[in-house]
């Protein structure tokens, strides 16, 4: 999803192979590929490792990682998603 699309873009810009990043994360290449496709979620600590390897802003990657979690939680609740997100915004900004 959002996170996977961005790390793929960064990886391609740096001309790195999936297997190189997978090795750095100590996972196999198919698992890394699933992260890029959005079929599997990276662990939080992996976000920071990827930010370092890809010379990316860790805040940007962590934000996209969290956004993916939110999308996953609300995607099947389209009728209520926007209202629920408004309530969440209010709650976290207290």
Image: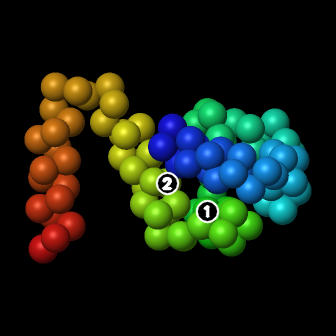
Tell me how the rendering is colored: rainbow
Query: Tags 1 and 2 in contact by the CB under 8 Å rule?
Result: yes
Q: Residue at x 54, y 70 (%)?
A: 58
Depicted 76 relative to depicted 25: above or below: above
Q: For residue 35, which quarter of the picture?
A: top right
Q: Residue at x 87, y 54 (%)?
A: 20
Q: Horizontally, is 55 left or right of 17 in the view?
A: left
Q: Alpha-carbon distance for marks 1 and 2?
A: 8 Å
Q: Horizontally, is 38 left or right of 87 in the view?
A: right
* Residue 56 position within the rendered picture, expressed as x and y whole percent measured from the top left: 59, 67
Q: What is the secondary structure assignment of the residue under circle 2?
A: helix
Which residue is identified by label 1? 47
Q: The C terminus appears in which quarter of the rendering?
A: bottom left
Q: Residue at x 39, y 50 (%)?
A: 67
Q: Horizontally, is 49 left or right of 70 in the view?
A: right
- Which of 60/13 is in front? 13
First in sequence, mark 1 or 2: give its number.
1
Q: Horizontally, is 23 left or right of 41 in the view?
A: right
Residue 40 seen in render: no
* Residue 62 position within the rendered picture, expressed as x and y whole percent measured from the top left: 49, 63
Mark seen at residue 71: none
Q: What is the secondary structure assignment of the residue under circle 1?
A: helix
Which residue is identified by label 2? 65
Q: Residue at x 12, y 52 (%)?
A: 87
Q: Residues within 10 Å of mark 2 (few under 14, many from 20)?
A: many
* Residue 5 position within the rendered picture, expressed as x and y whole percent measured from the top left: 56, 41
* Residue 34 position within the rendered picture, expressed as x and y whole percent measured from the top left: 69, 36
């Amino acid at each position: 999803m959002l996170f996977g699309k961005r790390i793929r873009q960064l990886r391609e810009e740096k001309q790195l192979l999936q297997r190189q990043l997978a090795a750095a994360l100590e996972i196999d290449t198919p698992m890394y590929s699933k992260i890029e496709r959005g079929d599997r979620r990276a662990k939080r600590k992996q976000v920071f490792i990827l930010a370092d390897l890809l010379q990316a802003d860790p805040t940007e990657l962590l934000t996209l990682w969290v956004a993916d979690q939110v999308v996953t939680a609300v995607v099947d609740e389209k009728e209520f998603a926007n209202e629920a997100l408004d309530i969440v915004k209010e709650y976290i900004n207290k």
